[in-house]
Image: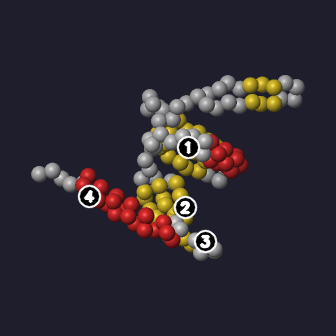
Amino acid sequence: MLTATVFCLKKETIMPEIAIKIAALLALTHTDEVLHLQFRDPQNQIHTLELPTPILGGLIVALTSKVGQIQGTGVAQPMALNGGQPFTLPDGRAGLELLLDDAVRLPVLFPKEAIPILRSALDMLEGLSSKNNRVPH
């Protein structure tokens, strides 16, 4: 739910609240000034939220803080992996920058001891993918 309070010179004005339930994120685009978040609601209506770039840092911090307080349900909107690029930081740590849904770049650090875990998970994923892609006779 979005609520805005505007402070005028002499009085406080409360703006109307707009609540839209998001069913799926469709696109994330940007200009230098605005981030455009396009999504659909449960009735399949398309909405676009325009976020000015100066507020993004504060918004990210606020969302990150709240996400840490939310108990996971095990249900999430899956994102398609479109690419990945290894990287290293100046301190020697290594990771992968994953490109998700052709829009979101997610840098993930992998401590050396986590690489075998990742490799094992990828092997299991490959096995699941092979099972699901078999053509019945």
Q: Give the mark, 3 or 1, whose residue is nearer the N terminus.
A: 1
Q: Nearer the viewer, residue 45 or 119?
A: 119
In the rendered image, which residue does mark 3 sit on?
89
- As drawn, the residue found furthest toward the right would be 10
| Residue at point 46%, 52% (across, down) | 101
**In this picture, residue 9 sits left or right of residue 77:** right
User: In the picture shown, does residue 104 fall above or below 50?
Assistant: below
Contact (CB < 8 A) between labels 3 and 2? no
Neighbour tally class for label 4: few under 14, some 14-19, many 20 plus, Cα within 10 Å: few
In the rendered image, which residue does mark 1 sit on?
37
**Helix, strand or loop status at disc 1:** strand
Q: Give the mark, 4 or 1, whose residue is nearer the N terminus.
A: 1
| Residue at point 46%, 68% (across, down) | 115
Residue type at mark 4: give it. Answer: Ser
In the rendered image, which residue does mark 4 sit on?
130
Residue type at mark 1: give it. Answer: Leu
Residue type at mark 3: give it. Answer: Leu
- As drawn, the residue found furthest toward the left would be 137
Q: Nearer the viewer, residue 4 or 29?
A: 4
Q: Nearer the viewer, residue 21 or 94?
A: 94
**Helix, strand or loop status at disc 2:** strand
Contact (CB < 8 A) between labels 4 and 3? no
Which numbered marker is on residue 107?
2
Q: State the CA–CA distance, disc 3 to disc 2.
A: 11 Å
